[in-house]
Image (cartoon, grey):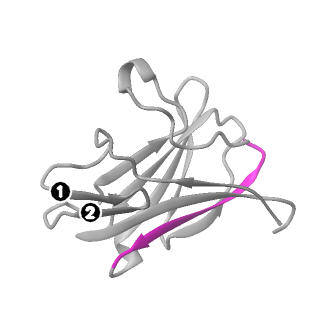
Amino acid sequence: MTGESWKIYWNEYVKDAYIYGSEIFFHAKDHVEFKNELMPPGTVIKRWYSKVNYQMMRIEPALPMIDGEGRYHISLDVSADSLDGLIVKLIFYDRYDAEAGSQIIRDGEDDFQCPLKTFSYEVQLINAGATQFHFHSIVITEIIDGE
């Protein structure tokens, strides 16, 4: 059984996107085209946050607040030649912004549970060899009792 579900989009704000040599086209809210032939593997293409300092970053949090005791499913909705070219990384932080744990998702979707001391988290879209793709959304769904 699934609980709440949240869709995260790539907004037009490009401060947290890899723009060096990149061509980024915003066709629609759920359709962003990304091209970069020269980006090295391991580069963070885009970041989303659950907690931000608005005074410093001038953006609102894009991720939902999640419970440290809950289980969740994350799935990446991307049109690409191969999903092997993109990695999603979750980084969890405690109340003092120290890293409390992380998880890497290689196949576009997986279940996760954050450490109990998680206060905020970040989702990173990382290049693993992709040169172009069409990003639609990331979906985080709460898992209720044994689903």
Q: Residue at x 59, y 35 (%)?
A: 120
**Residue most extreme to the right:** 145
From what the image shows, is residue 43 above or below residue 85? above
Identify the image quadrant of the N terminus.
Answer: bottom right
Judge left or right: residue 15 versus residue 31.
left
From what the image shows, is residue 39 above or below residue 98? below
From what the image shows, is residue 96 above or below residue 119? above
- Residue type at mark 2 is Phe
Question: Was residue 76 drawn as part of the magenta stretch in this picture?
Answer: yes
Judge left or right: residue 69 versus residue 57.
right
Question: Was residue 36 drawn as part of the magenta stretch in this picture?
Answer: no
Residue 15, can we see it?
yes
Q: Label 2: few (<14), some or many (≥20) within 10 Å?
A: some
- Residue type at mark 1 is Ser
Stretch in magenta: 68-80
From what the image shows, is residue 47 above or below residue 2? above
x and y, in percent, of residue 94 in the image: 60, 31
Q: Main secondary structure of the magenta part?
A: strand
Closer-to-camera residue (31/47): 31
Which residue has dot 2 on it?
34
Place residue 65 in its image quadrant.
top right
Pointer 2 and pointer 1: residues touching (CB < 8 Å)? yes
Label 2: element kind: strand
x and y, in percent, of residue 85 in the image: 34, 72
Closer-to-camera residue (87/23): 23
Closer-to-camera residue (1/117): 1
Q: Residue at x 51, y 59 (%)?
A: 138
Q: Which residue is drawn at 69% across and 57% down?
A: 72
Which residue has dot 1 on it?
22
